[in-house]
Image (cartoon, grey):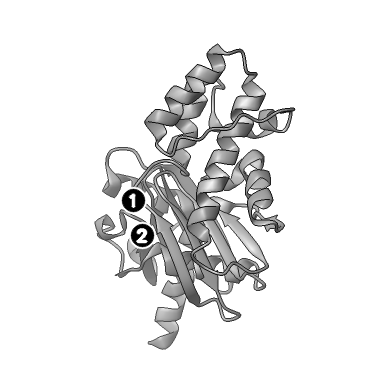
Amino acid sequence: MIVAGVDVGAATAKAVILKDEGIQGFSVIPTGYDVKLAADKVTKEALAKAGLSISIDDLSCIVSTGYGRDAVGFADKAVTEILCHARGAHFLIPSTRTIFDIGGQDSKAIGVNENGNVTDFAMNDKCAAGTGRFLEVMAEVLEVGSVDKMGPLSLESKDPCKISSTCTIFAETEVVSLRAQGRSREDLIAGVHRSVASRVAVMGSRIAWKKDVIFTGGVAKNIGVKRALEGEIGMEIIVPDEPQIIGALGAALIARERLKEG
């Protein structure tokens, strides 16, 4: 029995192949303009990385998730990313009780029980502040090169800047002004990370977060945001080895359950 989960997000498309009880392979690619093409390509790449010489049509069941889930024409079922993140995180780390997911265009806080079911959630999808896109804008303004390089630089900060604007455009203006005042790149980046963490923590305060806290999504790879978020919530945060594939993994697990239920 071979199943797949396909998570088409605003910034990246992810696919996970499950064979029997374990992850056989996965892939992560930029979503780009053509959502349907991205879904097809990432699934084929995941199959190739799994070492399987089969086509998408040969998969026993496919579940799609993410903002582009309804555009995945070859999926047997589409499921909300809230449910998929809960299933995926619980599968990898059964002690998961809270998930913070920061993607390209939104951020989420999800409460999970001992069975991996969603107990509560909060979501910010109205503003780019507190998302991966916000960090991309700031990386460009600060000429860092890429978001990946921001994390280590922020850890060198001695006096993080305070970024008070709640809008990406205004925050960009604020960062430019602080830069003109001679503030260091490290202090500016640390301030940006604290700004993101603060917004996510405020959003997440709508649920009662509990240990263990898991951080998923592409932004979870940024050590600076992780540290800042830990400071905001006063708890240690666990980042899975591949934080971007948690939603796709959850979708694949739901596909497997669907088959078992018959």
The residue where tag 2 is placed is: 56
Left or right, 245 with reference to 95? left
Helix, strand or loop status at disc 2: helix
What x and y, as percent, mark residue 111? 53, 70
Left or right, 82 with reference to 226? left
What x and y, as percent, mark residue 8? 37, 52
Whether residue 66 is visible here, answered yes or no, is yes
The residue where tag 1 is placed is: 40
Query: Is 49 above or below relative to 99?
Result: above
Query: Is 258 above or below relative to 160?
Result: below
Which residue is located at x 59 percent, y 55 percent? 215
Single out the mark in the foreground, 1 or 2: 1
Answer yes or no: do the residues labelled 1 and 2 have beta carbons within 8 Å?
yes
Point out the image quarter for the C terminus. Answer: bottom left
Which residue is located at x 59 percent, y 71 percent? 91
Hey, what amino acid is under mark 1?
Answer: Asp
Front-most of 99 and 221? 99
